[in-house]
Image (cartoon, rainbow, N blue to C red):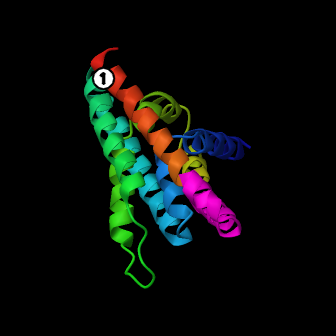
Amino acid sequence: MSVLYDLLVGLLLGFSLTIPPGPMNAYIATLAVRSRRLGTIAGLGAMSADAVLGLAVFSLSALVDLHSVSRELEGVGAGVLGVFAYRLVTQRPNPEGAPVREIRTYSTALLLGVSNPFQIVWWLSAGLAFAYLGGVALFAGLFGAIAIWVIVFPWALHAGARRSPVVERATVLVSFGVMAAFAAYFAALALGA
């Protein structure tokens, strides 16, 4: 019974990380309305970022007071989010038949994820706390929830965009707004405003 309980708690924690609107979901959404595959690849990059952040937080928490560098992390995150927000509204869709750059999509999502202050803060708070709660079943539930989200979310968005062309443009604009707002928010935190 304890393993099932840990698995369910892990699933809930995983969804608490993946479902809230934020820069990563904005990036995944922008790609997903154009291509299911690219949206899923971006999601896999985000999931890899969570694995990197999780390992880093657990490894460094015993050695470094990670809260002491929070302003620097927020500043870097604000810069990265600002660049990605700009790129969302200025990029042109690939013409038909152009090669898709899956590795670039994956690495962009990975970079966005490891520099995303929301993901960093989640791992420094909920992620670190949950590390002390349980073992393998918690981690399996957590990454199971992330895997479900990075597959279902892009596929659902892509299906909606195929039914209505307005969905794609609206998704790009909303995604830009979300990323720009988070960039401004984290910049304000970094500056101590």
Residue 33: % across, % down: 57, 63
Residue 44: % across, % down: 47, 60
Q: Residue furthest top?
A: 193
Magenta span includes 155:
yes
Residue 101: % across, % down: 36, 73
In the rendered image, the vertical position of residue 48 relative to residue 61, given as above or below? below
Instruction: Please indicate, yes or no, whether residue 110 appears anywhere in the rendered image.
Output: yes
Q: Is residue 40 left or right of residue 183?
A: right
Q: Amino acid at mark 1?
A: Ala
Which quadrant would residue 184 be assigned to in this image?
top left
Residue that badge 1 annotates:
190
Q: Is residue 98 left or right of residue 190?
A: right
Magenta stretch: helix, strand or loop mostly: helix
Which quadrant of the rendered structure holds the N terminus? top right
Q: Nearer the viewer, residue 18 or 179?
A: 179
Q: Classify mark 1: helix, strand or loop.
A: helix
Which residue lies at the image location 39% right of the left edge and 71% below the top edge?
A: 102
Q: Residue furthest bottom?
A: 97
Which quadrant would residue 61 be assigned to in this image?
top left
Which quadrant of the rendered structure holds the C terminus? top left
Residue 5: % across, % down: 70, 41
Q: Please give the range of residues in magenta.
A: 146-171
